[in-house]
Amino acid sequence: MQNTEPFIKRVKMDNWTAALLTGVACIVGYLVVWVKKINSLRQAEEKIKRARNRRDESLQHAEQAVLRYKQSHPTTDSAFILTLSLSELTQQLNEGLLRPEDVLYSYMEKTLAVNQKLNCCTEILLESLDQLTTVGSNKDGLLYGVPVSIKENITFKNHDCSCGVVINLDQPAEKDSVLVQVLKKQGAIPFVRTNLPQALLNYDCSNPIYGQTVNPHNPQKTSGGSSGGEGALIGGGGSLLGIGTDIGGSIRIPASFCGICGFKPTAGRLSHCFIFRMKLVSSSPGPMARDVDSLALCMQALLCDHMFSLDPTVPPLPFNMEIYRSSRPLRIGYLESNGYTHPSPSMARGVREVKALLEQAGHTLVPYCPLKMDQIIPELFLKGVFADGATTLLQKLEGGPVDPCLEPQVFPCGFPKWLKKTISFLLKPVFPRLSANFDALCGVGSVPELWKQHAAVEDYIQETIAHWRSCNIDVLLCPVTGPAYNFLYCGKLLTAASYTMLYNLLTFPAGVVTVSTVTTKDEEELKHYKGCYQDMWDKLFKEAVTGGEGLPVAVQCVALPWQDELCLHFMKEVEQLVKESKK
């Protein structure tokens, strides 16, 4: 017994030592992780500071350049230049009545003023001033001398394409995207890059690098997203033509919120021009402008031999002006609600009023209902966007701050798969839409499941085309989400954008035309809004759009794949009829 006592003491001592060492190791490990995190945040702050300094310097240089030009050209009538439509401007430039430098400096001055109010620009492209010396070599281009704004995620030589994500800073692009090259070949002058939401997967417009962009009609509202900088700048008069991108409504929603026109072409009709891409849900670059003719002119300029040569993956289909200018009566499908998200009273009224105008003009309107929306949005769209369980998104956001507008979206993405599945199961009886979303955030799970997902999307596209043809319609009139939201609601209401998301999934061309404004009566009716499910999301949507009196009201126009010109023709018809009705 006496012999065992020293052994027991040694064991106790060894246990105590092991416990002490384990505790020390845990503390050291925690300190290492903490130091790494602090260092990572410090590096992120330094990157953000450099990016903001670059923006501020470009704005200051632009202000000085504008001041010098105004002093040396006191007779330039900037106010007149800013009133011209794109077609009027191109005509005056081609006839030599205006010079490209007069136009560029006029819009640069206006952009600087708009940006001070709306915070819509990430930088002025000072290269545009140098381009003035060479733009004459492209005088035959359809966009000769036209200043064009560019969304920040579109690759532009020697500039970051951050997508509002810190990890992407300090990685300037090595060359211009195909679309930028084509714009320059057509004589356009890209002169400013515009703001977007962090990581693009949001229809607000705020990020930790450049901050929040606000609405040109009401600074207490968001401009929409993800092409919200474009929407705000064009809506505020600082640009008359811009290039945005659209993966769930990112051109159409800010066009709706800001009272302009926006067009998402058929997926693949234009060259892919930005770093964010996926296959299950197709993204598309497209034009944003004050009127439909400007969208059509931009598409005509881009769909040229130069683009087809630079990017052989794009079908060589030039713009068909005959279809765009057609005057034949159309057979038009229409819907006020898709059964998944009920539109606000103002947006439903917009569809009804446009329907009446179209019928008076001799077009045939027939009811239409999209198929299986309650299944398609979570199972095909969301699961397609988050096919990897949101792993890539979370990786991109590591080491930097998450913007408040994105936090509600990102937070559940970080849950382990078993927890997402459990929450989905528990929510199913009481909140079926949120339950389906949690299940979608789990992703597809495996390569065989990914193949099944691809097949399901293709099947749905064919099923929708068959349904469309059974209704014997040429085009479709439907709502778009809106009016412009109050801040910090977009991240809580991702699937409220179901009206636009659907046509990215289907790859159909779709565009937005502003047709009215929110009235006092609309606001009164909104007080009684219930929604489709009468759940938390419907209540949040009502809160999001409250206080919208005077804001733009828009409708969405849709056509079958590769019928982009027909879609634009339909948009033009809507625009024209609305304009005539207001005389």
Image (tube, rainbow, N blue to C red):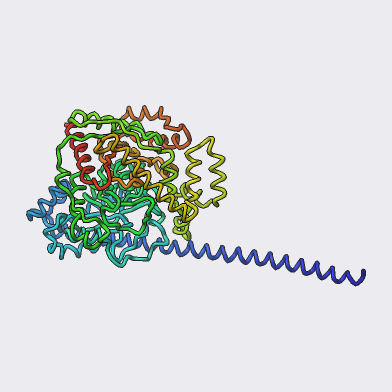
Q: Quadrant of residue 11?
A: bottom right
Who's the residue at 50% across and 45% down the image? Answer: 438
Task: Check the image and name the residue furthest to the right.
Answer: 1
Tell me how many marks there are. Answer: 0
Quarter the C terminus occupies = top left
Rendering coords of residue 536 (x, y %): 48, 36
Q: Is 331 placed above or below 159 here?
A: above
Is 176 positioned to the left or the right of 100 in the image?
A: right
Q: Between residues 276 and 312, which one lies in front from this camera angle?
A: 312
- Answer yes or no: is residue 52 visible: yes
Is residue 214 at all visible to an observer of this figure? no
Residue 16: percent from the left, percent from the top?
A: 76, 66
390 relative position to 195: left or right: right
Q: Toward the viewer: 107 or 384? A: 384
User: In the rendering, at what x and y percent does residue 120 appear?
Assistant: 31, 51
Compared across the picture, whether 264 is left or right of 460 comes to left
| Residue shown at 32% from the left, 65% from the top | 173
Please tell me which residue is depicted at 74% across the width and 68% down the height of the picture.
Answer: 17
Q: Is residue 563 left or right of residue 94?
A: right
Q: Between residues 394 and 240, which one lies in front from this camera angle?
A: 394
- In which quadrant will I find the N terminus? bottom right
Query: How far across and down, in percent of the image, does residue 133 sit?
Result: 15, 65
